[in-house]
Image (tube, helix red, strand yellow):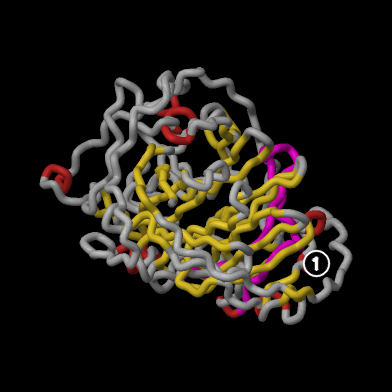
Amino acid sequence: MQKRILAALLSVALGTGVIVSSNDGDAHAEPTGAPTGVTGSGPCSTDPKPVHVGPIPKTLEMPIQYPVISPVPYPAPTTAPVRIQTDLPADPCTDPCPDLTDEGPAPQSLAGLLGLPELILKPQPFVFGIPVPGQQPDPLPSPPAQVTPAVDPAPRSPARATPRVREVVEISKQTGAHSINRTDKRWQVYGTDLGIMWESKPGEIATAFGDTVGRGFHPPGGMGGDWRSNVLAFSTDRELSDGVSYDSMVTDSRCHAAELLSSRKIDNVEITTIPTSGFAIGDRQYMSYMSMRTWSSLPGTFFTNHGGIAYSDDHGQTWTKDPFAKWDNIFGLSKFQVSAMVPQGDYVYMFGTPPTRLGDVGLARVPKDQVLNTSAYQYWSNDSWTPVGGFEAASPVVTGPVGELSVRYDSSRNVWQMSYLDTSRLGIVLRESDSPQGLWSEPAQLVSVTQYPQLYGGFIHPWSTGEDLYLNISTWNDYNVYMMGAKIG
């Protein structure tokens, strides 16, 4: 995980001091900082107001790679997940587990006394794995029956006008110390990113986070101990204008958020497993994810093993990575490695990019009752839904560079919305369309690196309205999640 700093997007990582031009004439407000929040939520009166980490970090952890040849068992070893339900105090300002979360001040180093970043050199093995037999696997279920979908016409709709972004403000710090949820004290989530949201049931929103660290956290990036590849929160908060309060997280011990989708945590084999979108159909939750081989790659790129789908039948407490619902990363350039999946009508639509922040967006659809059957997917190609050619034949619906894709259907206006990190514009942008295949509007900038250096993410809250758009962003400097609010004309 630490080597993500080496794979951070070049244009965003160097965003400090870069002037970004925009071809829309609307003003973008500077970040306002987090408000005090609703009564009973943070920042607490005893806490300082959250501030963003400056461009010069206090601590910089530098991984030093060295090659290792090592046997790697297949299939991967598994353990039965442990889950507990913990009743936390109603007031987030009450520390429920001081014995677990109270940390004394770190001793001041010479670099700190001089006002310089403390450099930590951390050896990291880069594994060249030799496959060996692992534990006896559980018997696999029978694969889904092969189907042959028809070829259906799907012409593009006329392009909509560029969305008019009238105002963008920072609403709240969602995670970490002094956030409105005080996730460090309540669930030992000190640093995390992404914040992918979906309606898990009527009146409830699930939020999935990426690589998460606990005690010893020190930005930039996810540096520290207690590494979990992903965690999950739930909220029933409908008042989004002051941030989203989390009611609970999936936990495996007292005041400790559980890892949902396991990963080997072996660099160049499977370093982590990152959620990319989520949705619910009936009582089943689905989560698309990418199995990360390594972050150690050229700026703006990374390498995946595959993109896949996991599901949960116990309301997100435990998850199963479906063994058949996978899109393998062939030669490192395959499409649909990073996917955003959206149910609408009779279908689930899958928007996907290659394993980079630089690629185009492809599109597929599948009947809602066939989500885990890859043979049932139709890919949009040259004005048709077709299985011919498979996922590699999908035509671009939006040309890159596209990173951290988020898509929703605004039923109040019958309009599709898409936000993503556009590395050519050094910011998160918004597009709209009357159909999933487009034509999509020209992008309007929402958040720029002139405001938030080392910006990424941009995941839309499902309860946004046509005029009020809410989204979660992350920054590498802070390595936590912030909610933004945008007024859309």
Q: Position of residue 127 (x, y in %)?
A: 51, 67
At 58% from the left and 20% from the top, the residue drawn is 87
Q: Amino acid at mark 1?
A: Ala
Question: For residue 15, what is the image quadrant?
Answer: bottom left
Q: Which contiguous range is marked in magenta?
A: 301-330
Q: Nearer the viewer, residue 467 or 338?
A: 467
Whether residue 266 is situated above or below residue 360 in the rendered picture: above
Whether residue 251 is situated above or below residue 151 in the rendered picture: above
Residue 349 forms part of the magenta stretch: no
Q: Nearer the viewer, residue 388 or 128?
A: 388
Task: Quickly name the residue at label 1.
Answer: 376
Whether residue 166 is situated above or below residue 258 in the rendered picture: below
Asked whether residue 431 appears in the rendered view, the answer is: yes
Q: Is disc 1 surrounded by few (<14), some (14 to 19) or many (20+) residues within 10 Å?
A: many
At 34% from the left and 27% from the top, the residue drawn is 36
Residue 317 forms part of the magenta stretch: yes
Whether residue 3 is situated above or below residue 390 in the rendered picture: above
Q: Position of residue 130 (x, y in %)?
A: 61, 71
Q: Nearer the viewer, residue 84 or 44?
A: 44
At 43% from the left and 39% from the top, the residue drawn is 214
